[in-house]
């Protein structure tokens, strides 16, 4: 296995065991928990933000665990817009509500931030085959970056439970796809089992700590886009729970390196039909109980999240909150964000907006709140197709004029 970049260490999130080289499947050999990458030393503000002509994730190379001479496998990911959504904000009682629109990444989701780093590391280590289990976005992203790197991509997906737009991406990018009976958790279980037995293969799920390193750059960008300020709250969807821990890690690094003085409170939102982390957090438990997930928000339709321990830590360390929303609330929020602000997101990306309808007033009208909208709406169109047939059909100008008169 390849040695970790100079100045970095792999550390178990549970027992604290350290490793100087990558570990197959990135699981601690002592206690079987996940590993995280820890940087020794700090990065200056100038070092972090001073790069010019290098937009996106790789602008922050000095905070990423790869040597300077390693050539990135990149599609110009990151650098996504932070949009002030005043109309939605007014409806939920927040003056300073923003959306970080991660759906504008190359494959249409936030997964690209982590994938560029993890695929670069895998190729550097000699991997010839990239493997992941997915509810759709990870598969699409990995397939795109595998194509960019010129290596083979193999994805496992829960049969019948992935949005067609995401499956189309996987096929278009040339990946090999295998459907698995059961849900995402079943797909991930067999994927990790196979990965532990095959050489020249790299797992690209969020158990891979290099994914987390790429995703933490979301925090760096938010801080800069807000005029070098930290928001009061960061609200985001929680599925397998890698992203909430990644963004929290990014904000903590900014504080620990002396670049910022404050930390945000993290708000994790799950679907009512898949809320093991919400249940554990609200009841003060130190572990999650797996559930059989069922939600229209396919990207977070996960009942046994791999990164639950790190997610609970992020919520508790930040004095944050966790809550669940129904599918009906999610779809209403999705349509509202699109029709009032022009931002079309997949259902999972709308759960933060749905959550703010419940808690917005509690946060305080003057609170600065950033919602992480993780995926583009074109990836998951099934939930809006039912409205297409209800639209009027005309055959000539007179009928159109009549309809327009009624609309005016």
Image (cartoon, rainbow, N blue to C red):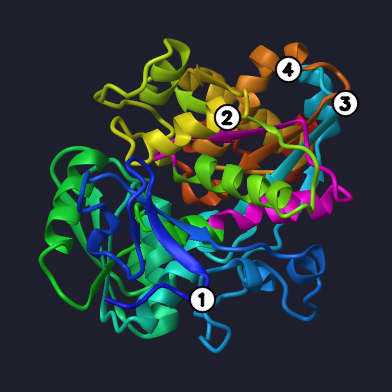
Mark 3 and mark 4: span between their CA atoms? 10 Å
Residue at the image position 19 percent from the left and 54 percent from the top = 192
Q: Which mark is residue 66?
A: 1
Q: Is residue 224 magenta?
A: yes
145 in relation to 210, above or below: below
Residue at the image position 29 percent from the left and 58 percent from the top = 26
The one of 189 and 342 positioned closer to us in this rendering = 189
Residue at the spot of label 2: 317
Q: Is residue 204 left or right of residue 160?
A: right
The one of 367 and 39 positioned closer to us in this rendering = 39
Q: Is residue 136 left or right of residue 25?
A: right
Mark 1 and mark 2: span between their CA atoms? 28 Å
Q: Which residues are magenta?
A: 215-241
Residue at the spot of label 4: 360
Mark 4 and mark 1: span between their CA atoms? 40 Å
Judging from the image, what secondary structure is the residue with disc 1 in?
A: loop
| First-in-chain label (3 vs 1) | 1
Residue at the spot of label 3: 95
Quarter of the picture holding the C terminus: top right
């Amino acid at each position: 296995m390849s040695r970790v970049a100079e100045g970095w260490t792999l550390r178990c999130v549970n027992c604290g065991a350290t490793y100087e080289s990558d570990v197959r499947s990135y699981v601690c050999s002592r206690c079987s928990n996940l590993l995280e990458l820890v940087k020794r030393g700090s990065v200056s503000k100038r070092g972090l933000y001073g790069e010019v002509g290098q937009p996106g994730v790789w602008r922050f190379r000095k905070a990423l665990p790869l040597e300077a001479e390693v050539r990135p496998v990149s599609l110009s990911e990151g650098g996504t817009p932070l949009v002030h959504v005043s109309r939605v904000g007014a409806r939920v009682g927040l003056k300073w509500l923003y959306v970080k629109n991660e759906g504008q990444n190359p494959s249409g989701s936030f997964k690209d931030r982590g994938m560029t780093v993890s695929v670069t590391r895998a190729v550097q280590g000699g991997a010839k085959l990239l493997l992941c289990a997915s509810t759709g976005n990870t598969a699409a992203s990995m397939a795109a970056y595998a194509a960019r790197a010129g290596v083979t991509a193999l994805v496992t997906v829960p049969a019948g439970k992935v949005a067609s737009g995401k499956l189309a991406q996987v096929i278009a990018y040339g990946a090999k796809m295998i459907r698995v009976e059961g849900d995402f958790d079943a797909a991930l279980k067999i994927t990790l089992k196979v990965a532990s037995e095959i050489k020249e293969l790299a797992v690209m799920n969020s158990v891979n700590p290099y994914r987390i390193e790429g995703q933490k750059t979301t925090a760096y960008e938010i801080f800069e886009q807000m005029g070098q300020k930290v928001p009061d709250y960061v609200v985001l969807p929680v599925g397998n729970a890698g992203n909430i821990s990644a963004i929290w890690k990014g904000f903590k690094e900014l504080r620990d390196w002396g670049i910022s003085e404050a930390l945000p409170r993290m708000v994790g939102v799950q679907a009512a039909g898949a809320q093991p982390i919400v249940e554990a957090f609200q009841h003060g438990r130190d572990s999650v109980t797996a559930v059989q997930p069922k939600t229209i928000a396919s990207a977070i339709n996960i009942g046994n999240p791999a990164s639950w321990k790190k997610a609970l830590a992020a919520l508790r360390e930040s004095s944050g909150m966790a809550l669940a929303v129904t599918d009906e609330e999610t779809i209403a929020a999705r349509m509202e964000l699109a029709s009032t602000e022009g931002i079309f997101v997949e259902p999972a990306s709308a759960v933060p907006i749905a959550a703010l309808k419940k808690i917005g007033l509690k946060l305080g009208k003057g609170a600065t709140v950033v919602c992480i909208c993780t995926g583009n709406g074109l990836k998951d169109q099934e939930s809006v197709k039912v409205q297409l047939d209800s639209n009027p059909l005309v055959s000539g100008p007179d009928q159109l004029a009549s309809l327009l008169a009624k609309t005016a």
